[in-house]
Amino acid sequence: MQIKESSKVYDVIIVGSGAGGGMATKVLSEAGLKVAVVEAGPFYDPANPEQSTQLKWPYESPRRGANTRRAFGDFDALYGGWDIKGEPYTVAEGTEFNWFRARMLGGRTNHWGRISLRFSQRDFKHKDIDGLGENWPIGYEDVKPYYDKVDKLIGLFGSKENLENEPDGFFLPPPKPRLHELFYIKGARKSNIPVIPSRMSMVTKKINDDRGVCFYCGQCNRSCQVYADFSSGSCLIFPAQKNGGQIDMYVNAMVREVLTDEEGRATGVSYINKEDRKEYSLKGKVVVLAASACSSARILLNSKSKQHPNGLGNSSDVVGRYLHDSTGASRAAFIPELMNRDVSYNEDGVGGMHVYTPWWGDHSKLDFARGYHIEVWGGMGMPGYGFGFNPNDLNRFFGEKIGGYGEHLRDDVKKYYGSVLGMSGRGEAIARKDNYCEIDPSVVDEWGIPVLRFNYKWSDQEIKQTKHMQDTFEEIIHNMGGIALGDKPGAANNYGLTKPGEIIHEVGTTRMGNDPKTSVVNKFQQLHEADNVFIVDAGPFVSQADKNPTWTILALSWRTSDYIVQQLKAQNI
Amino acid sequence: MDRRESLKSIVLGSLAGSFALSCKGELEEQELAVIADGATVYGRTAEEKAIDEQLYAEQFFNEHEMDTLRVLCALILPANSEFGSATDAGSPDFIEFMAKDYPAFQQRLRGGLMWLDHESNIRFEKEFKFLEELNQKQLLDGIAYYDYDTPSSKRPFEVNFFSLVRNLTLTGYFTSEMGIKDLGYKGNTPNVWDGVPQEVLDKHGVSYEKEWLAKCIDQSKRADLAQWDDEGNLLT
């Protein structure tokens, strides 16, 4: 086969355009470097009326937003999902993993929950406290300046709370709580469980001229057409282009491997152009992988050469290992006091919760490691597919008949509209060597690229943590005067613990460390075994905290990008 | 007024109100320019458009089945003095679309409609759609209610069939323009969230704490560029 080579040599080739790739694109291009961004999906701009789903009504979709075609429904911005046609992955017998992938410019940032939490000093050095997992080779003091810069560049709302494990930042003011959130605050406080304003990356106040200000449609998962929420394309890549960055965008370009020379250093990447189904190569002085933790691991494992027979950066056999996702569990409650809502006002608010509970536990009294935060949901949302299903099941709490037909169904739906509140726990799992992804030798995708096989099992730590979530949910529900819905998940189903991968916080596959025998990248996210290859997605995460990973991906990507600029200037790489 | 125009006026209306105290006009302009350009498509990729078109081109239910669905949907949610029935709001067409979009529904729905006619023929010697409303209701009374504690897998087929039709009928209705108006949902439009109205707080016996409110956005300053001191205290 003839691989088509481009004669142009880029300073940096960035693989992937999500949080990590977007930030690298911005910082590196604004430093004057010639950058190629290689994205496996199409171009996407939420301001493009052809692509925007924001402010659409459910009846504009013939399936009323059902998720038969898009994983999170017709109006969700994301292209990709749990299953991508022609791009399978496999799971080893007796283990489970669900892998969510984006295929679009901006990646998963186009629809994520925007929960933007900093890791604390404890999060970076948790092994010192409980002996589990591994410490990061860096601490909060290394990342803090970058968290600060990310806050100011991208914008997030929140409040200064002076909590040791929830470092404060440069916040925009948060929105006021909604009605059901006031009930949650009351219920949680009765059990001395803290509740504070959410910390999420929607712009509640003007932050710069590139970005609009939130107009409270509650649809951040549809990606904002005035760029009032953080999406990588609209907030990093487009502004970088506007600022005159030399950025060549390769979309629908699926990277197969990193190409290396006789010394084992990267010379570029090869990719499949999905439009003409041909293989191409791009030359670059530096390669930055930002394809997502598992996709970057896959690229490294598929980058085999004489110098790197076990895959690039993998003589340690660590690539793909220490994969971990957040734990997750949920419970919903019926709050009789929230029946018969006054519908005279619009309470869409921002997309997602206005308040949340950061981890508060005291491990001297607990039988599991690490913690979780609690997210709250409910309210008088816009109807979509599924609205009105089992319209009067809640009648059972009043001894009334369930089902029926006729005019009373109208009343039932209205009576219960907005009376159900839910809680979701999102916790920290322990990174383990034996939870990993590897290349499945017997399967390739439609681009001819060997696919990943996952091996992942939860341990007692995660299961016990989830039991604690469920007990906590019930306590709060009771405090709110609510009635927990459904049966309480028990030991037989791991207390409702989600399957690995389902929370879409998978991290750890190319972990950071000082020792090349036990880690893949150094503290600047630079491959130990090829000094011009960097990883700026969540692969380098040593542990994942009970925090959503995005804000840390952004801070570390910026830090690594600064390091790349400095190393190029010093002619070290 | 087309949707684009009406959206524009809503934006103008709500923001003009909220910005009465702010002398900066910039922000409104910016939001308007983009939103007013919104087209009536719902953001499909080429592949998704092709799927929708293909599904629209197919017909799953035959005319008799569609007639029966129309009767059924209107019985499930009839018109009242203010609003039309679920059939008026388009639930039967929505069910037809879902049957094609989610083929697992096909056998359950089609088999259920056959069951309905069969039962109707036995009891009243007519197909369901030709029955007097009184007889239609007599028949539905036997399948429209269920015991919550019996798992659906243990309930009779016809009860599950009716539950499915009821669910789709109601979703079809409450996601229609008419149903949203009936429900009274006020969102999906640019606005400025400034908390729960006092009378609603009072009605539910809750209130905002002063300390909490002090942290929240002062919406009259949302157009002022954010600036902080070195400690992260917002100055603007």
Image: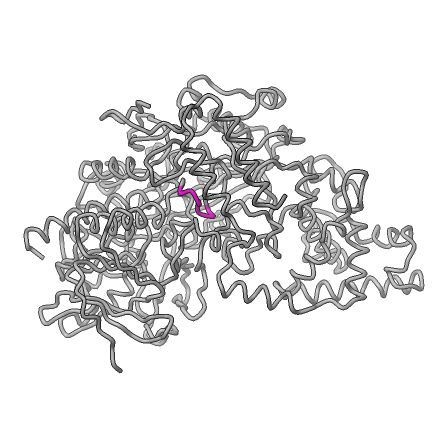
Residue A207 placement, left or right of B125: left
Depth check: A457 or B71 in front? B71
Q: Residue furthest bottom?
A: A1
Nearest the eye: A541 or A471: A541
Give the answer, above or below, for where A272 lies relative to B139: below
Q: Position of residue A411 (x, y in %)?
A: 74, 37
Whole-percent x and y of residue A429? 35, 47
Q: Which residues are magenta?
A: A221-227
Q: Would residue A158 be found to the left or right of residue A562 on screen? A: right
Which quadrant: the N terminus of chain A?
Answer: bottom left
Q: Is residue B153 above or below residue A379?
A: below
Residue A458 lies within the magenta run: no
Task: Kindly identify the residue that appears in the image at 40 percent across and 38 percent down.
Answer: A212
Q: Main secondary structure of the magenta part?
A: loop
Q: Is residue A85 left or right of residue A297?
A: right
Q: Is residue A224 magenta?
A: yes
